[in-house]
Image (spheres, rainbow, N blue to C red):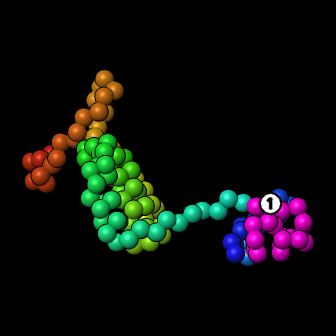
Amino acid sequence: MPIYEYVCPACNGRFQKLVFGFRDPEGLACPRCGASDVRRAISRVAVLKSEEARAESLGDASMFAGLDEQDPRSIARWAKKLGKELGDEAGDDWDEMVDQMLEEELSGAADDEETDENGGTQAKKKRSGSPDDLGWA
């Protein structure tokens, strides 16, 4: 007995229904608004992997394909891919956390650069904090 997911065009509601057989049941209606013009929706599919299969996929060299460790965006893409492989263990907010870290990294990189007179960027000089370096002497 499959569980089908349905969508109601009238109220944009989604609901599930346990169905006997493979046909939509008679008298099917939206539980929110009562409309009978509902259609079957395509549901997300979960693929279960054993711990061994998951560990193998994490160690696969293709996980690192296209990774540029000097590019924060490339590292963020890799981290999101890793999060998908980890599944529930990564947590619901994994992608959000990666985006926040990327934003912080990019804003920090912008702070470490300055624009020269030709419009190009170059790294700012790091100051040691001594009075001479700060122009106080």
Quarter assignment of residue 42 = bottom right
Q: Which type of secondary structure does the marked residue at label 1 adopt? A: strand
Left-right relation of 122 to 87: left
Q: Nearer the viewer, residue 133 or 109?
A: 109
Q: Which residue is depicted at the point 73% across and 76% down?
A: 18
Q: Which residue is mark 1?
A: 39
Q: Which residue is depicted at the point 36% across and 59% down?
A: 82
Q: Nearer the viewer, residue 94 or 47?
A: 47
Q: Nearer the viewer, residue 111 or 130?
A: 111
Q: Which residues are magenta?
A: 19-40
Quarter assignment of residue 99 = bottom left
Q: Residues within 10 Å of mark 1 (few under 14, many from 20)?
A: some
Give residue 6's position: percent from left, percent from top: 76, 65
Quarter assignment of residue 60 = bottom left
Can residue 14 be seen here? no
Quadrant assignment for the N terminus: bottom right
Q: Amino acid at mark 1?
A: Arg
Give residue 83's position: percent from left, percent from top: 40, 62
Give residue 3's position: percent from left, percent from top: 69, 72
Q: Is residue 125 above or below residue 49?
A: above
User: As drawn, which residue projects farthest toward the top?
Assistant: 118
Q: Which residue is depicted at the point 83% across and 62% down?
A: 38
Can residue 85 be seen here? yes
Q: Is residue 27 magenta?
A: yes
Q: Which residue is depicted at the point 30% across and 66% down?
A: 55
